[in-house]
Amino acid sequence: MNAASRRPLLLQRFRGRSARRWACGLIAAVSLTGCSRQFWRQQADRDVYDAVGERLDDPRWAVPRVDITPDPRSRFFDPYNPDKPPLPPDDPRAHCYMHWVDGWEGYKGWHQFGDLMSVENPQWLAPFGLSSNMIDPETGQYVGQLPAIENLTLDGAVELAQIHSRQYQTQLENLYLAALDVTFQRFQFGVRYLGAFGEPGAAFTSRITPDGIDVNDGVSGSSEFGVSQLLPTGAQWAVEFTNNTLWLFSGGNQTSSASVLSYSLTQPLWQGAGRKVVMEALTLAERQLLYAARDLARFRQELFTNVVADAGAISFLGLLQTRQQILNQEANLMRLQDQMYALMSNAERGRLFSSAALPAVFNPADPDIPETPAYLLNLPPELQGLLIYDPFDQRLRWRAVQQPGRQEGMMAADDLMTLEQATLLQQLNDDPAYQEAIQSLIRQVRNPVTSLDVLQILTNYNNAQNQLRNAERSYQDNLDAYKILLGLPPTIPVTLDTSLLKQFELIDPILQSLEKEADTGFSAIWGSAIPALALGADPDEPLPPLDPDRVRNVADQFDGLVRRVRSEILDLIEDEIEIVRDLIPGRLLELEPEEQERLETDFERDQRIFDGARRDFELIESQIDDFREQLRAARFEPGRLQDIQRNIKFLQEDLVRTIRTLTVIQVGLRAEMIELNDFDMTEEVCIAQAMSNRVDLMNARGAVMDARRQVEVAANRLQASMALIAEGNFGTSDPNNPFSFNGDNSQIRFGVRFKAPLDQIAERNNYRAVLINYQRQKRTYMLFEDTVKQEVRRALRGLIVQRRNLETSRGAIRRAALQYDATNEQTNDPARAAQTANTGGLQGQNVLQALNSILNAQNQLLSNWIDYERNRLNIYRDMGTMEIGPDGLWDDPFYRDTSNASNRPQTPFVVPPAPAAPGDSGDGWGRDGDGLGAPELGPLPF
């Protein structure tokens, strides 16, 4: 059989044997690919959490959470397989390079695990009723309006930060990474596997050589397996087993095997020797894991203080302060508007009684008695009762009559004098003196000059509107930044709960409501009993005929109003006086002498004013009871019904003044009832606490020692390198037995390895740099220690100053309330009618000064309290004694007391309920329209 005829048979034999060998090799290769991703991840987690648990042995840094897996409610929780996650959204232009780059086709299996529409957790909004089905597949964004977080409380904000804060997650991961380094350094000192390429392994080589007649083929294999260990002194031992085997499949299937068992021991003597050098990496890793645990504990304190107050305006208390200032400004605008209309009303009274000088005429028969000019005696019907001349005063007066559908304070020129009436007046007589007087009278009535008082208030009002809009914009900016601090998207609508500031509700809403009802509300009721009334009626003139039933209804409603004031206001303030009386002894122990005098003086004045207001109120009660008794009669004396109606009006004015007096008293009492959280440590105690408990100071102190140890490590590298070496091996004697070790085939070797320290410039430079770094580290620690003391002293000074400032603000808001009450009385005093145009702006200045005093006192009182609380938070944090619970809240009675949500007051002084609280609708503009909801001025007569 020739070679050509035998070739198919040889190839068949070759293929059969090769297929079996390669199949076996493939199975072996697959089995040696290693453990799965999940195995290594879970093994790392076990080792890391064990190492971390060893460090949480002190309550000062025994944090409740170390797991880096985010809360399932978090925005960044990943619900997918962590080892084979889907692909995140990618930039479309850059993504093409994953599939085709530089003319080469890329990997085709990128998308085998799926693709994500968004990097956010698709279920994080599920508690709010939104599901992943509502996500736009094109943009990855939710379709429709995001849910609103209404009335977010402080503990709710802290909880959101615990769930969604990216910085908190980063700190947890920093701890994990520090522990990972520890596990590696510990592994360095364990018994490790080794082989030809650093790890145990094997190699198989198949050789096939067809010679035309037969196939000379065989397989050679080699394997290495060993263990080694680094010892703390720098010594290292190793034991390794090596085997080489040859299988020949031609010529009788021969097998030959040879094995070697080798060992070695190396001990450095100078460079690289000694525990201080060899164990430095492990020592540093273990210490840095401790530092990381402390950093996490410190961060939890900082996260709480930042969320609550320390981030300035971008904090819970900071936002509440800004929100309250906006409400204060809105209330101030309302008061400005009220004062403006009051001044305008006074000006209108002047227009109702406008006058001009006109010489009288004298009868030659009786030259001492002035007489009215003849052309003023028989006036046209259109002017009768309106144009009046007093010959004794020699003044010509115009008396206007109320026009239907108009309100006082908003009257146009035609409401007081029509153009036809002005024409008739000019045509009465051509006398130059009369023409001069009547032109002056027409100008006063139809073309009045706006008083300087009104112009000043209007200018201030417009400026305040601009300030309010800027404050609202700033609030929205800060609220968006606060959402990001909590880990929320800025587009989600959020409003804040204000219960923490409830103790700043210095005027009870019921009192405000009753004052408005007693003033404007009852005025409408009183006027409904009168058929018609001239705007300029003399108070001494009798009223038109009245309906007795209507007057009885007015009296009954006024009596009901009086009874409500008694039950809802007078008794409440009397109770508050007793509360303050009980607080005073304790307050006096905390105050400086001048503050003690201020408190006692103010409280005595409160009691004295309240006693006077109560007497006035009791007189109102007795008089309205008397009037109601008289109204029960079937018949009335002539004019008596009109007298009762007029006297009820006087009682109403007395009641409004009494309510305003009670308002001033309540402002003062509630200002005294504002509570501060106590802090009574001395500076020495605070600094000692900080020196003992600040975990970051402990870390800074440890960093100095780390730098000192590095000096020894760097110095060691300057020494000569010498090592003692002992090694040997045992070989096998039987080629058919891989374990036939024989002493005749063994070797033992001893030696010394030496390297002279001649080329040491790099080591020299490193050593000098380490020395400098050590000195720097000491200075850094000194600075850090000084900074800690400075922070404690600054916070303590802030506590002391803000406590005293709050006492000053209590008095300031009392004075502001009195000043505004006095100014309000002057503005509404009928005796000032027709005089405001001649005040030269003095009354307007008084009004603006009073209103600014109220606004500043409101804002300052709240600012003092919040700054005090901010400093209290800071000093506990800076002393390192702020214990944060598992829920992220400080274990402090004030923040743990759930009654804060319902029992604590809210709005500094005279702030009526706003039409809409500053908040966020999600569009970034806050409330409605221009985002303000600010009161607008009504139409002005100029």
Image: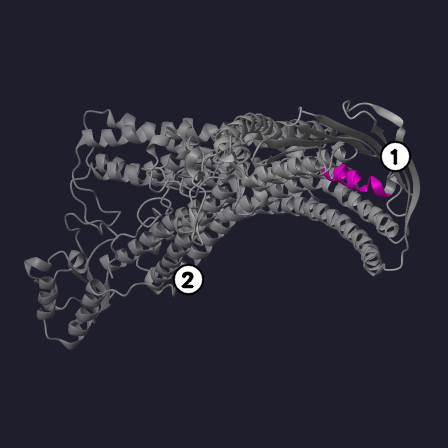
Q: Which SS class for mark 1?
A: strand
Per the image, is 851 magenta?
Answer: no
Residue nearer the viewer, 149 or 318: 149
Q: Is residue 155 left or right of residue 249?
A: left
For the residue marked with disc 2, what is the amino acid? Answer: Leu
Residue 680 lies left or right of residue 106; in this view the side is right
Q: Could you tell me residue 180's position as x and y percent?
A: 68, 35
What span is colored magenta in the figure? Answer: 277-289
- Nearer to me, 327 or 621: 327
Residue 665 screen position, x and y as percent = 50, 39
Q: Mainly helix, strand or loop, the magenta region?
A: helix
Q: How far apart are the alpha carbons under marks 1 and 2?
A: 110 Å
Dot 2 alpha-carbon crowd within 10 angstroms: few under 14, some 14 to 19, many 20 or more: some
Q: Is residue 285 left or right of residue 121?
A: right
- Percent x, y of residue 440: 21, 70
Q: Residue pushed farthest bottom?
A: 432
Residue drawn at point x = 9 percent, y = 67 percent: 423
Q: Quadrant of the C terminus?
A: bottom left
Residue 363 in sight: no
Q: Helix or strand or loop: what does disc 2 sit on? A: helix
The answer to whether residue 556 is visible is yes
- Disc nearest the viewer among 1 and 2: 1
Is disc 1 in contact with disc 2, using a CB cutoff of under 8 Å?
no
Q: Quadrant of residue 646?
A: top left
Which residue sits furthest front? 1
Mark 1 or 2, nearer chain start: 1
Which mark is drawn over residue 842?
2
Residue 772 vertical position relative to residue 223 in the rendered view, above or below = below
What residue sits right under mark 1 in the picture? 728
In this view, the residue in front, 213 or 98, is 213
Q: Nearer the viewer, residue 152 or 846?
A: 152
Vertical relation: 122 (above or below) 452: above
